[in-house]
Amino acid sequence: MKSFVCNNELARLEALRQYQILDTLPEEAFDDLAFLAAQICNTPIALINLIDANRQWFKAKVGLDVEEMPRDTGFCPICMESGEVLIISDTLTDEEFARNAVVTSAEFGVRFYAGVPLLAPEGEAIGTLCVVDCVPHQISPQQVEALEILSRMVVRQLESRRSLVEQVTIKQEYNQVQKALHQSESFFNNSPVMMGIAELVNNDILQISDDPATRKFFELTPEEMQNLLAQDMGVTDKQPSLRIHCYRQAKRTKSPINFEYSYDTPQGKICLSATVSTITLSSGSRLQFVYVAEDITERKQVEQQICEQAALLDIVSDAIVVQDLSNKILLWNKNAEKLYGWKSEEAIGKQFDELLSTEPLAQHREIYQPVLKNGFWQGELHKTSKSGKKLIVESRWMLIKDEHSQAKSILAVDTDITQKKQLEKQILRAQRMENIGTIASGIVHDLNNVLSPILMSVHLLKTKSRDQQINEMLSIIESNVKRGADLVKQVLLFARGIEGDVQEQTGTRQHTVLEVKDLILEMRQFISQTFPQSIAVYTEIQEELLPICADSTEMHQVLINLCLNARDAMLGGGTLTISAENIWIDETYANMHIGSTVGAYIVLTVTDTGLGISKEILDRIFEPFFTTKELGKGTGLGLSTVMTIIKEHGGFITVSSCVGKGTKFQVYLPAVQQVPMPALEVV
């Protein structure tokens, strides 16, 4: 039963909605009917009341100032739901009606009510026509019949009004359809896209109908185009079998087929993109096809230019990257793949600064300001490749604008200058060391001239003095002078190595063929006897290690200095590794490292797990008298002497370090003989 009531209510509300009457302005026809009802029944109040889901709305009213009232207030809902005439001569005589809000309210005080339901053509009650009085009232059968007639007139007026609205709507829709049809015809006649209907006849395509664009393309009149075969259209179809195949495929699959083909014309090659589909006709009719074709010659030319330009981008040796204004990568050329390690499909769509930049974010954003303001920026940037390799690039940024001169994207061209910067650093270091060596050489000779007379005088005084106390003082002076002389010798050794004064030294040093393996094993024994037990020592020596030509004492001095520095860097213990292997230095690597030549080398590596050396002081560790040790614990001549000895032997030394992880020194010395060996990888 509940479902029936609900369905009736939904049908009633839908019937009311179709009239589109609620909340409309007053209309004279409805006002006249309400006035007649009040006059016929001789009451001060008459209403045409339409009831929706939540309220009662008065389309016409006499003697009442309110526009609406709640859905369940008063007697109209009772009359509408009953579907019959409701007459209450005196509301106070019926206990149920006497408690109604319109009766007890001082504003209304209803004592008499007579209502007739408003029934739509399908029988749905959508409201009431009622008369009301504030005093008891009697109504005759003739008056009731008149109210019923008036209620039907209200409904007829609603129907007339709906018909008029529908006619207006239909007219508006008709006008819109006419306008759309006119626009469609205008579009069809002016569209650059070719459209028409064709049939397959004897392995050819027969033109049935067409549009102005098709006739313009083939330079034919409508009469000439009618029932014309494709082979007679005056142009050379380069792929006639392709078109016929696509038509047949559309017939077989019963779905649209897209394809591209071309014509040769006096003006050149014309490329078209077409879609063909079958048309469903009555049985017995010959199968027809609708086609849509578009001239894509210009687009193909642009695509060809883009391909050529893209090929040029891949040929250049620089990394080229295009990013939009939100930093998203749009283009990534082949050399960008090679330099940074990310493939194009990995990089495109990623954020530029997150993928590449190791600059502080604030500094990176500062680059955008001059680019957006001036259209260009150039400078050096530090980046990290996919493998973690640190790179230095010379970067040039250019703003790209669209056809409206609005900023669109940024083109970045990066040139790898990592090797160049490393070579510049080596040259500057060599120049600095050369200057220091020149100065040190002059100072050493002067100090030698000062110390020699002192030492000779001490010897002379000791032979003549018999006083023990004086002899002790002379011994102290002699000891300190000798210590000073030793320091002078170390500085002189450094200075001569820097200046390349090898001829003077070859007469006093014996260079013999040495086995590096023996040097390492002797050093390991020395370390195990003298270094703290908290330091573990490991050796890694390649089999068939080539010998070197060197001074044994000086090679011991090199290893001793490097190992002592490693020990001092591992006060809390750690691991010391000494290794040696054969390598081959090629021309590329030789060009990157001053002092190296192409050929076979022995690389002697000393690695520790100590404190490490910061970048700020790493470039100064080979300078004489530079030390990070406490006062009195180092002269600052150890590494400078090591470098001098290695240079005298035709070698060179490199160092890498990470703070908190350790340091690695690599000594490269020319091998005596050459056997097949791996080339050194350039890093």
Image: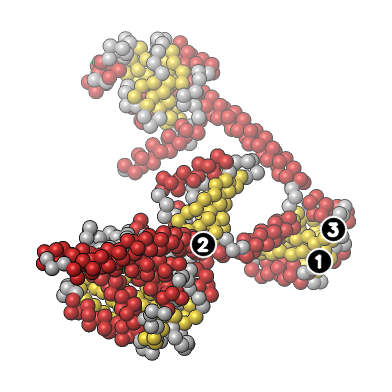
Q: Earlier in the sequence, mark 2 or mark 3?
A: 3
Closer mark to the observer between disc 2 and disc 3: 2
Q: Which residue ends up furthest to the front in the rendered image?
A: 464
Cα gap from disc 2 to disc 3, whole angstroms? 54 Å
Which residue is nearer to you in this view: 653 or 97?
653
Q: Which corner quadrant of the image does residue 446 belong to? A: bottom left
Image quarter hosting the C terminus = bottom left
Residue denoted by label 1? 237
Relative side of 222 to 651, left or right: right
Q: Earlier in the sequence, mark 3 or mark 1?
A: 1
Distance CA(mark 2)–CA(mark 1) = 58 Å
Mark linked to residue 267: 3
What secondary structure is marked by label 1?
strand
Q: Nearer the viewer, residue 412 or 642?
A: 642
Q: Residue furthest left?
A: 468
The amino acid beneath tag 2 is Lys
- Relative to 157, does residue 231 appear above or below in the rendering? below
Residue 50, position in %: x, y?
A: 43, 25
The x and y percentages for residue 164 are: 59, 28
Q: Which residue position holds label 2?
A: 420
First in sequence, mark 2 or 1: give its number. 1
Residue 95, compared with residue 202, is above or below; it is above
Comparing 641 with 221, the one in front is 641
Residue at 26% x, 83% y is 522
Q: Amino acid at mark 1?
A: Asp
Residue mark closest to the camera, 2 vs 1 = 2
Q: Which mark is residue 104?
A: none
Coloring scheme used: secondary structure
